[in-house]
Image (cartoon, helix red, strand yellow):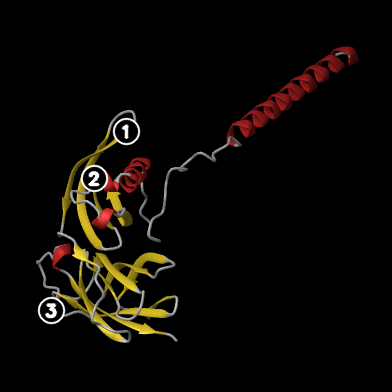
Amino acid sequence: MNPKQNSVGVGAIALIIVLIIVGLLVYTFSMNGRIGYDDSNINQNATTTNGNNTTSSPNDLVIQNYVKNNISTLAPKPATMGGTFYVTNITAQGGVGTVSYEDGHSAYVADFTYNIDGNGIPAVVSFTLRNQGVSTATSSVKINQNIVLRVGESSIIKDTDFRITFNSMPTDNRCPVDVQCIQAGAVTSNITLATSNTSSTFNLPSDQVPASFGSYKVSIIKVLPVQKSRVQISQGDYVVTFHIESTN
């Protein structure tokens, strides 16, 4: 092979190598462009609730807002003395939900079912009260004493503007009395605390320190009925003794 032919062969090989490198670079930049797509919309509708790992779908949030905005229309009983109902707690998932609401005089808890059509329009199918409403009258219980409430009941502590409402019992993990357990377990009640200036709705565990609200502290002293294995306690059966104390 003469030098000229050898030079041509080397040049051809070099050209092929260059083309391969260019092709790899083009492919790499192309894949980087695809891998670097904007994923900011992924799971944007997932919402963590109550500090747990559960999520609320967009439809669940839609129905919650619908019930909040239309509670006065959905309520089977009118508000007391021309007042206005407002929601203190609501949960909704998979077509069923529970809502606690009041008007400052009477408090109610209701179970409801719902559906949402293909256009995203919500509709409440049924709305059933768990109780007939309990007057938020001034209690005979004074500060630094215990008060007993059922689900849906609300009371103002005597000689104060402090009001406590027992909305629901989200969890009951107490050890059944007919079972031997390592731990006694606890319950979590959902309550609303309010004064003439402010209010707050939150979950109150029975095994934690008293919850502070302004110049008051609230804790759970006793829960009835007792837990038994293979017995389901309905929300309307819960009776909780709360202790109310002043920090002043």
Which amino acid type is shown beneath numbered disc 3? Val
At a point 28% along the width and 48% down the height, the residue shown is 71
Of residues 153 and 230, the one drawn nearer to the viewer in this rendering: 153
Indicate which disc residue 177 carries.
3
Q: Is residue 94 visible?
A: no
Q: Quadrant of the N terminus?
A: top right
Indicate which disc residue 74 carries.
2
What's the CA distance linking mark 1 and mark 2? 16 Å
Indicate which disc residue 248 carries.
none
Q: Quadrant of the C terminus?
A: bottom left
> Which residue is label 1 attached to?
121
Closer to the N terminus: mark 1 or mark 3? 1
SS at badge 1? loop
Question: Where does residue 53 sit, x and y in percent of width and height?
Answer: 38, 57
Question: Where does residue 166 sit, x and y in percent of width and height?
Answer: 26, 68
Q: Residues within 10 Å of mark 2 (few under 14, many from 20)?
A: some
At a point 43% along the width and 43% down the height, the residue shown is 45
Q: Looking at the image, is 171 positioned above or below residue 81? A: below
Q: Residues within 10 Å of mark 3 (few under 14, many from 20)?
A: few
Residue sitting at the far front: 81
Closer to the N terminus: mark 1 or mark 2? 2
**Looking at the rendering, which quadrant does residue 134 occupy?**
bottom left
Q: Residues within 10 Å of mark 1 (few under 14, many from 20)?
A: few
**Looking at the rendering, which quadrant does residue 88 occupy?**
bottom left
